[in-house]
Each structure stands twice: as C-alpha cells, then as structure tokens.
Amino acid sequence: MSKVKINYWLLLFAIDSMLELASQLFNWNFLSLFSKPLLMPLLIGYFVSASRANRSPLKKFVVLALVFSWVGDAVLMFQNINGMYFIIGLVAFLLAHVMYIVGFTKLKNSTTKVERLAIIVFFLAYSATLVIFLWPGLGNMKAPVMLYALVLTIMGVLGVIKSTTNHPYITFGVLFFVASDSILALNKFLIDVPFNGMLIMGTYIAAQWLIVAGVSKRINPA
C-alpha cells in the first residue's frame, strides 16, 4: 500500500475524530451516531495498510483489540436506554484490553527490574485508590468493575514495560486509556465530570491512535 493511501486513512481518522469531539462538546448526538462508530474501522484501515508487509503475530491481536473496541463504542451509545448495554460494552472493552495484553507480550522488555517494580506499584496504587473512591457508588457493579480495573491495570503495566525510549507511543497510549476509563467511571459512579463526553472521547481517541502508532513503529522499524 502506498504512503498516500496510508495518509488517507489517517486523514479520515483525524477528520472523524474532530467531528466526534465536536459532537461531544456541543451535544450533537445525531452526528455522534455516525462519527463514533467510524473511529475504530478507520484506525483498523490505517494499521492494516501501514503494516501490510509485516507478518508479526502482534498484528492480529491489535486488530482484534480494535474490533472489540468498536463493539464497545457502538453498544455504549445506547447505555441510557438499558443498563445491559453498559455491561455488554464493559465486556467488549474488557476483551479489547485482553487482546492488547496478549499482543504486548509479543514485544521485548525495555525496562530494568527496578523500573518494572516501580511501574507495577504505580498502577496497582492508582487502581486501588480509584476503586476505593468509586466503591460506595458501585452497588451491584462491584465485581465487574474490580475485574475490569484488574485487566486495565495489567494492560497498563505491560504497555509501559514493553515501551522503549525511542518509541514511547504505547506508554502514552495506555496512560490515556487509563485516564479515559477513569473519567468514565468517575462520571458514572461518583460525580458529574464537566465536559465528560469530550474528555472521555478525547483521551480514548488519543489512546487508541498512540497504541496503534507505537505498535506500527515497533513492528515496522525505520
């Protein structure tokens, strides 16, 4: 695939991202019905075209993570209609994180033992603190949220551990993902976060793009 085609996918993704953020900022729900479900397919198009010549086993797990993310995006659009849609969306993103976890294991470590320990402690402390704050408002969602927090923590730890100084995209990507899910959880279970839609989608879009860009650079070294 030519570079023009790769840039074309990125251009479409960037335009759709701006439309989605605008829909969240101005509450243009009708626009979001079209812009949100297009985000992951466009990113998949970019990733597949950018790594077509590479046969890394990591590719299929990234694509599966994006597919499950797309399912989550679509389903969560209807969570206000029925609470089951939130559960289904949670499961979809849980599976997306699992795919990223499996994919990240295919990358070589780029940190020392001390650095890995510090990273693990940081993510565990952050996740535990967040769950403690959310706990009173979780109700019957305590077990699902704890499971999701554990999987997200593992994904975050591996994403940072497997990143490199030259390609820190994955590190920033997983941190943005944690931020996005944290804002979503705080807004749903604890407080009304101002501009929550734009903040959640902004950090989520950045997270997915950074992870895809980081993986692309790792499996397609210059």
Image (cartoon, helix red, strand yellow):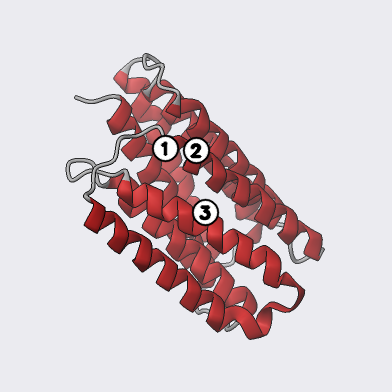
As helix, strand or loop, the secondary structure at mark 1 comes to loop
Residue lying farthest to the front in this orientation: 113
Q: Amino acid at mark 3?
A: Glu
Q: Report the residue marked by disc 1.
A: 105
Q: Amino acid at mark 1?
A: Thr
Q: Report the residue marked by disc 2.
A: 102
- Measure how far apart labels 3 and 1 are at the Cα level: 32 Å
State the image coordinates of residue 161 (x, y, percent, origin top left): 31, 49
State the image coordinates of residue 69 (x, y, percent, origin top left): 58, 45
Q: Earlier in the sequence, mark 2 or mark 3?
A: 3
As helix, strand or loop, the secondary structure at mark 2 comes to helix
**Crowd around label 2: few <14 · some 14–19 · many ≥20 (10 Å):** some
Residue 176 in the image: above or below residue 55: below
Residue 188 in the image: above or below residue 64: below
Q: Residue at x 30, y 59 (%)?
A: 117
- 129 with respect to 221 (left or right): right
- Measure how far apart labels 1 and 2 are at the Cα level: 5 Å
**Crowd around label 3: few <14 · some 14–19 · many ≥20 (10 Å):** many
Q: Residue at x 58, y 79 (%)?
A: 134
Q: Residue at x 32, y 39 (%)?
A: 214
Q: Report the residue marked by disc 3.
A: 20
Q: Residue at x 24, y 57 (%)?
A: 115
Out of 196 and 191, give the one closest to the viewer.
Answer: 191
Quadrant location of the N terminus?
Answer: top left
As helix, strand or loop, the secondary structure at mark 3 comes to helix
